[in-house]
């Protein structure tokens, strides 16, 4: 067990050095520049009255809820996660599970809002549909994905973060840390 635990953390450390950050037209950034740019985008849009919207499935939904709460409670930025169980089961029943985020975004998104789309595989159809819906509404988009680098989510955001492993645990841990890093960077600049 000890050997596995050591290998697990060594791999996490390695993955952290291999995160890819891109912008529109697949322009690559240094990872830390990507954090800075995403933070500046959120600050700018929030100062104009725009909000953050988070979407994700499973553990990514938990990250979405946690980060939406932290952004508004600690960061003073309006934020919401579309993963209330009644909302999801209603929309899933009436429209189909692949439309649950698309329908929420159609109803609540406004031009200039920011969608944070989190998917370990980057291939979840409901996340992709939600992201396309946000783009149609004039929203900015930040994506977090993993598994295969050519996953469709990694190429459709204004800022994209990709974790290079096909193991759920490390992808989820690093996605969560990226979100916290963006928020903590905003708070550090705000509080000096």
Image: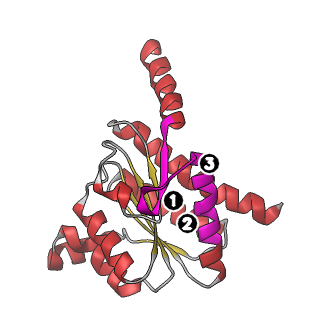
**Quarter assignment of residue 69:** bottom right
Ranked by sequence position, the earlier of labels 3 and 1 is 3
Instruction: Give the residue pinned by disc 3.
Output: 32
As measured in the structure, the alpha-carbon distance from the residue carrying label 3 to the one carrying label 2 is 24 Å
Q: Is residue 186 above or below residue 107?
A: above
Magenta span includes 39: yes
Ranked by sequence position, the earlier of labels 3 and 2 is 3
Give how far across and how far down residue 165 sits, in percent. Answer: 37, 36
Give how far across and how far down residue 139 sits, in percent. Answer: 45, 78
As measured in the structure, the alpha-carbon distance from the residue carrying label 3 to the one carrying label 1 is 22 Å
Q: Nearer the viewer, mark 3 or mark 2?
A: 3
Instruction: Give the residue pinned by disc 2.
Output: 69
Q: Main secondary structure of the magenta part?
A: helix
As measured in the structure, the alpha-carbon distance from the residue carrying label 2 to the one carrying label 1 is 5 Å
Protein image colouring: secondary structure
Q: Is residue 87 visible?
A: no
Instruction: Give the residue pinned by disc 1.
Output: 66
Q: Is residue 122 visible?
A: yes
Question: Label 1 neighbourhood size at 10 Å, few (<14), some (14-19), many (20+)?
Answer: some
């Amino acid at each position: 067990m000890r050997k596995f635990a050591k290998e697990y953390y060594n791999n996490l450390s390695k993955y952290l050095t291999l995160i890819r950050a891109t912008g529109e037209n697949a322009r690559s950034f240094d990872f830390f520049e990507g954090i800075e740019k995403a933070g500046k985008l959120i600050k700018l849009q929030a100062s104009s009255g725009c909000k953050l919207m988070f979407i994700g499935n499973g553990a990514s939904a938990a990250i979405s809820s946690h980060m939406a709460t932290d952004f508004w409670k600690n960061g003073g930025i309006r934020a919401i996660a579309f993963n209330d169980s009644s909302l999801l089961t209603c929309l899933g029943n009436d429209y189909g599970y692949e439309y649950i985020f698309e329908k929420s975004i159609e109803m609540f998104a406004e031009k200039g809002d920011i969608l944070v789309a989190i998917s370990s595989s980057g291939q979840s159809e409901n996340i992709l549909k939600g992201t396309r819906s946000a783009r149609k509404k004039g929203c900015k988009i930040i994506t977090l994905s993993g598994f295969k680098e050519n996953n469709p989510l990694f190429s459709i955001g204004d800022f994209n973060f990709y974790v290079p492993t096909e193991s759920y645990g490390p992808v989820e841990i690093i996605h969560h840390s990226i979100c916290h890093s963006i928020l903590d960077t905003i708070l550090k600049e705000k509080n000096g």
